[in-house]
Amino acid sequence: MSHKPALRNPRLESAGLDSWIVRLFEDIDEHNLLWLSALSRRCEQAFGDALIDLVPSYTTLLVVFDPLRVSPSDARTLISRILVDLEPDDSAHAGEIHELQTWYDTSVGPELSRVAKHAGMAVSDVIDAHSQQVYRVFALGFAPGFAFMGLTDPRLECGRLDTPRRRVPPGSVAMAGRQTAAYPTGTPGGWNLLGRTNARLFDRAREGFSLLRVGDQVRFVPVSREEFEREGGDTTPMEPLA
Amino acid sequence: MRQQANAEPCIKVLRAGPLALLQDSGRFGVRHLGVTQGGPADLYSWAWANLLTGNPWGTANLEITFGGLQLVAGRDLDIAITGADLGATLEQKPVPLWQRITWKEGETLAFAKPASGLRAYLAVCGGFVAEPVLGSVACVTREELGGFCGMGAKLAAGDHLSVHATELHAGEGLKQAPREAIPDFSQPAVLDLLPGAQIAHFAGRSLFDAFNTWWQVDDRADRMGVRLIGPRLNCKISTLVSEGINLGGVQVPPDGQPIVLLNDRQTIGGYPRLGSLSPLSASRLAQCLPRERVKLTAKGSGAVLEEYRSFRALFNANSR
């Protein structure tokens, strides 16, 4: 960890009768998470049972409360008071560390070659560059347990597909821009697919449901097809893009 | 719990229609995991169906979109149908809406198609039986969560639905909604918008247009959101870093046509927003059919809070 950005000019913006968006930063930065985590904790204490949901994202926290118990103006006052002496939560900087076993292969990651071509690198170098980095979870959204992680090696930066796939198989490990993710369930998607993980990313029977949380750290660990299959991975190849 | 599960399923689905979903008040406390809210698109009518059947706030009932649903009762049930007029009949005789009625064993309850409004709510005294998933039975098909099976399935022909036994006695509680409480969905909707978010970044002309246009509801309208067609709204910022988005949020993508976010919206999004509809205006919009007209009007949070409080107070006063 190098410097911590100071909280320059936090802003509160109405997001409806029951919520405020707290805008802490303008730009994406790993250190934002320390502040967002601290703000979440303080909101939990301040709102107690009147708190409905907290949605952290790259630079903001959406605070949703029960307007029958806390009026929008009282909620604004509560949050403003927290912001006066908010300190980054250094204990949260580590997050949990996850290693996701990933089978990188063009049969399940057809855009390995697209990314390689785009970067002017060999496919094996793309795999190295993607798997050697520890990523941070910036936000969850799009689908239950879908974690937006970053930032990737700048050489790998690659835009989305022009036409999204109608269905991306669960476990698909993907990239778009300088972000990376793994699809928890089969959904439509336009990211570049690099491989597949056997990790269960969203499990309704698990305590906490989602494997990954905002602030967690993630590394994709390359495994062989045999290892991937042994751990229950699905090796069904992708259908070519229509 | 005062209710007990009735072992026997007592409603059979003969025909499912395009979309019939079990909905409680929604799934809360899990949005940070990317799980959406779900719940009734028209909270107002959903709540009235529960009120008229003596069910407490939050009891799951059926949201019937467009019609086409046919059900047969396996025993006598007290029910109420609120929301849209979808031409509901019992044994081919029109059913009175917004009041408690008895649905006798063996009778077929059928929904035809929209006469006014889009979504009807069917509540049964005692409430439907389903196992909560992530704290709620709210059915979200895209996320494969909730509903009768827990996997987010909409109703299908051949389904058997169970209802909790109830102690409700005939004559107990409010049986009929007063005339002034029944919305007229045939009138163009005027929707209250709480200004907020990025409204300051919209061009002056666009702000004028936003609040002085009869917007037309697009075909692209579902439980995730409703697109409105009208003059192009211009915002100085075209996309944002994704952030949490709330029910009723009015986002404007680069094409300048606003999308009002409803119950099944994604949990984060990156388009600039004008603000959010009031909860009851989001309910009203959910009853609009494609090509109907709506107008946006700016409202302060004080007035919106007052309206929401009196709506909810009705339930505290009349619920058992």
Image (cartoon, coloured by chain):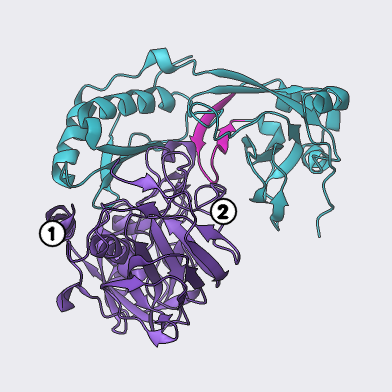
Mark 2 Cα shell of 10 Å, populated few (<14), some (14-19), many (≥20): some
The spot of residue A93 in percent (x, y) is 45, 17
Residue at (39, 49) in percent of width and height: B245
Report x, y in % for residue B313.
Answer: 14, 55
Quadrant occupied by the N terminus of chain B:
top left
Question: Crowding near pointer 1: few (<14 within 10 Å), some, many (20+)?
Answer: few
Task: Confirm whether residue A122 shows in the render.
Answer: no
Q: Which residue is mark 2?
A: B142
Report the span colored magenta. A135-151
Residue B98 seen anywhere in this rendered image of the structure:
yes
Residue type, label 2: Arg
Q: Secondary structure at mark 2?
A: loop
Percent coordinates x, y for residue A56 in the rendering: 41, 35
Q: Which residue is labeled 1 in the image?
A: B310
Q: Is residue B61 magenta?
A: no
Relative horizontal placement of residue B223, taking residue A240 as reference (left or right): left
Which quarter of the figure has residue B300? bottom left
Q: Compared to B25, does B107 lie above or below?
A: below
Subunit that carries the residue with mark 1: B
Closest to the observer, A9 or A145: A145
Q: Colour of chain A?
A: cyan
Chain letter, purple? B
Quarter residue A103 falls in:
top right
